Amino acid sequence: MQMTASRADPKSPQGEPAPLAMEGIGYSIGGRRILSDVSLTVAPREIVCLLGPSGCGKTTLLRIAAGIERQDEGTVRIAGTVVADRHTFVPAEARKIGFVFQDLALFPHLRVADNVLYGLSVKARGPRQASEALAHVGLEGYERAYPHQLSGGQQQRVALTRALLPAPRVVLFDEPFSGLDRGLRDTVREDTVRILRERQATAVIVTHDPEEALAMADRIALMREGRIVQTATPEEIWRWPVDLEAARVFSSLNSFTGRVEGGIVETPVGRVPVGAEREGERLVVAFRPEALRVFPVDRGAGVEATVEQRRFFGTHVEIVARVGEVVLKLRADPYLVPHAETVRVVPDLRQAIILPVGE
């Protein structure tokens, strides 16, 4: 039974109704819990990335927002209106949302213009609208082409144009760039963000690629085993992860455990100040590879490390080095230590990640 209702809705900081608000979402299949008490509010004109490994529930959450799946528990609101709860279910076609699928879902038998206009009512369709929309994404002159005649990046722009043309309240993307090669993926990603910004659109993007989430999102919702474990800006989630597992989503870590004595934790790479208020606590101190600065061995500061492996990546080298029994993963300037057998390692204390033991 289709019903709609108007109830108190989470507001954006600007006081506008949130284009998408999900509260206490729970979902199971065959007794297996897929989502547990998931809540997420997306502000107007915000780009949010749902980031997590396969099986964490991110695509299921997106499908519930779209109305493709129905949750067992919780409430979904779009622009202030309840579209799904225990008593209400508004189907996908009535939610006024755009959806860009992983496979783009372009109709192979329809020309580009007809694909773009597909989501509009018959009265609203017209060749001028298609031409103007395609020109906006750099595809003028492609109205009569078929999808198979376009590159992957062009197909992506057609799918995005089709999703945006009806002026949806929110656009949902299910890993839309996963089928593109790396060079093209970066370009299409940048184009997508630019178009979303120009249209002042609200978007939720599912991805398993941390780099993609950092590059695209205003906020990242990090998912793990059916829950959102942290929601923060890219900078916040990089600098202040909620736990070590969250930190490792974005890069490898060099982590050390120690007790605070005199406001200091002693580590194999040096002393790390953490503050007298944490005296006696056992803490984990972690550094990403680039946060351990690498210098020639004749520099006096830092600890001496023996290089065991070196991999060249053009802009940097990745080094595996050893300090006593401790193995370090480092990232360095290839011109500063081109083929050194020993190096000096100095921690950048500003980049230290400090967490209680067990988190």
Image (tube, rainbow, N blue to C red):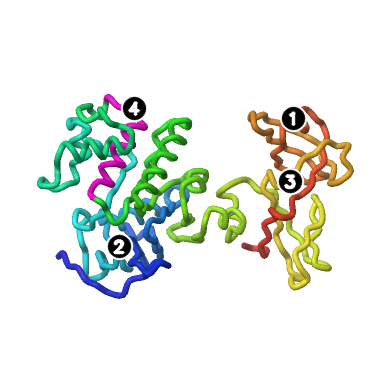
* Residue occupying the point 71% across, 55% down: 350
Disc on the earlier residue, 2 or 4:
2
- Residue interval drawn in magenta: 149-166
**Image mark for residue 335:** 1
Mark 2 or 3: in front is 3
**Circle 1 residues within 10 Å: few <14, some 14–19, many ≥20:** few
- Please state the horizontal and vertical placement of residue 47, each as a whole percent of the image: 41, 53
Quadrant occupied by the N terminus: bottom left
**Circle 2 residues within 10 Å: few <14, some 14–19, many ≥20:** many
Query: Does the stretch in magenta take in 12?
Result: no
Q: Which residue is mark 2?
A: 71
Disc on the earlier residue, 3 or 4:
4
* Image marks 3 and 4: residues in contact by CB distance under 8 Å: no
Disc on the earlier residue, 4 or 1:
4
* Residue occupying the point 71% across, 57% down: 285
Instruction: Tell me the kind of residue under disc 4.
Output: Ser
Label 1 secondary element = loop
Instruction: Tell me the kind of residue under disc 3.
Output: Leu
**Image mark for residue 292:** 3
Q: Which residue is mark 4?
A: 151
Query: Does the stretch in magenta take in 158?
Result: yes
